[in-house]
Image (cartoon, rainbow, N blue to C red):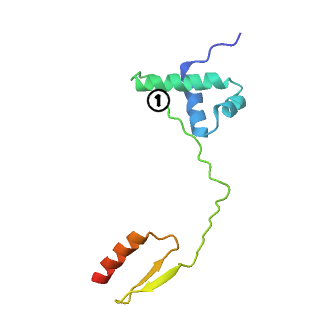
Amino acid sequence: MQPRTSAEEWQKRVERWRDSGLPAEQFAAELGINAGTLRFWGYKLNKAKREGAGVVAPVTEKRPVRAPSFVEVRTTTSPPAFELELGNGRRLRVPTDFDVDALGRLLSVLERK
């Protein structure tokens, strides 16, 4: 029968696990311990800290941030359906799917200036 592991030892293990950024299964396998027990101690120590028990140091879960291997960016430039030159020298490009009422309101505002 193996001797019981102290709370202090579990605290050290949990802190090393959190710092490693590894999943519990992988970290536990490397130490030869049960992943469920590791997660239990992480929970228990974090709960004790929240409740103000002076037994534990801060335990926070750190998860690795995985960046995507690539990001596809597509840019499409479609020519506007038409371009209007206003009396004041301004140009207005109107896309093919314009809103007729909104364009009318915009033109009336621009022509006033």
Q: Is residue 110 above or below residue 100?
A: below
- Residue under the image location 62 percent in, 48 percent down: 66
Residue placed most toward the observer, 72 or 105? 105
- Residue under the image location 31 percent in, 83 percent down: 111
111 on left or right of 60: left
Residue placed most toward the observer, 87 or 27? 87
Helix, strand or loop at disc 1?
A: loop
Q: In which quarter of the image is residue 107?
A: bottom left
Residue placed most toward the observer, 44 or 97? 97
Residue placed most toward the observer, 51 or 53? 51
Q: Residues within 10 Å of mark 1 (few under 14, many from 20)?
A: some
- Residue under the image location 56 percent in, 23 percent down: 41
On the image, the x and y values in percent for residue 47 come to: 46, 24
Q: Quadrant of residue 36?
A: top right
Quarter containing the C terminus = bottom left
- Residue under the image location 62 percent in, 67 percent down: 74
84 on left or right of 9: left
Q: Circle 1 is placed at which residue position?
A: 57
